[in-house]
Image (tube, rainbow, N blue to C red):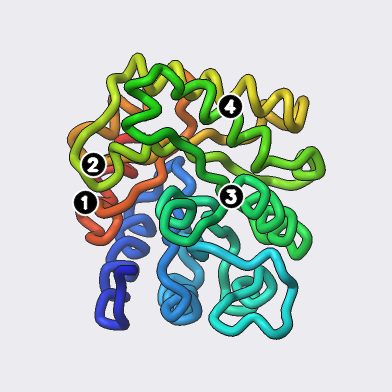
Amino acid sequence: MNGLASDLAEAKALAADLAERPCAARVALCPPSTLIWRMAEAVKGSAVEVGGQSCSAEPGGAFTGDISAAMLIDAGAKLVILGHSERRAGHGETDASVRAEALAAIAVGLEPIVCVGETLEQREAGQAVEVVSRQIAGSVASQMASAPFAVAYEPVWAIGTGLTPTLEQIEEIHLAVAAALREAVGEAASRTPILYGGSVKPSNAAAILQTPGVGGALVGGASLKAVDFLGIIRAV
């Protein structure tokens, strides 16, 4: 829940820098729904894509306050983050609801980024692999094999805390996610990026992105300023 019209200058600065110095990374910004249309217009013609932060599993109707996948596309979005830990914890989203949202997204051509991750208690109990594998099985439908999507591993205890798992822990979970994806969508798992999210910043981005199994980053607070986000993008 960050971003006002005045912050569009950061998106424009990001797009301008990438136009001047192109990079191999695919770059997207996922602002709150109030800014999607204006941000899409602000970065139009650039390498920066725009996405949403959530969407309803319903295509439309009497669901006051919700936003459908078709509405996100209509506003200029190409991607949508689903099942973020804050949505799961604060809004009661479950694996089943995330699965339904993902299917709704791909039905209209919106690319989902499905989030999974363990809490600190689950990590300390040695359940991290079990938890994320179960979340993949419940959140990723076999029908998604025919559409582009990504998965983001975000250890809940590392989001916004400044804490980061060791590279060995990140590799372990990413390999577990890859295995669970193969069970869920078969061969399509090989072309599905597995992103890491959780206190990614310019100082640790290179090491994380070079870790086996990591196919990108889901960036939180460091994406709010162009200079910080660019420091991560340039680490690719």
Residue behind mark 2: 201
Quadrant, the N terminus = bottom left
**Would you say 111 lies left or right of 199 here?**
right
First in sequence: mark 4 or mark 1?
Answer: 4
Location of residue 231 by image quarter:
top left
User: Disc 3 and disc 2: Cα gap in Å?
Assistant: 29 Å
Q: Amino acid at mark 2?
A: Lys
Residue 234 versus residue 4 in the image, above or below: above
Q: Is the residue marked by circle 4 packed among few (<14), some (14-19), or many (20+) residues within 10 Å?
A: many
Q: Nearer the viewer, mark 3 or mark 2?
A: 3
Instruction: Tell me what residue is drawn at x 74 percent, y 54 percent.
Output: 103
User: Disc 2 and disc 4: Cα gap in Å?
Assistant: 26 Å
How many numbered marks have been drawn onto this rendered protein structure?
4
Circles 2 and 1, Cβ within 8 Å, touching? The answer is yes
Mark 2: secondary structure? loop
First in sequence: mark 3 or mark 2?
Answer: 3
**Would you say 199 lies left or right of 35 here?**
left
Residue behind mark 4: 133
First in sequence: mark 3 or mark 4?
Answer: 3
Residue behind mark 3: 94
Q: Nearer the viewer, mark 3 or mark 4?
A: 3
Residue behind mark 1: 228
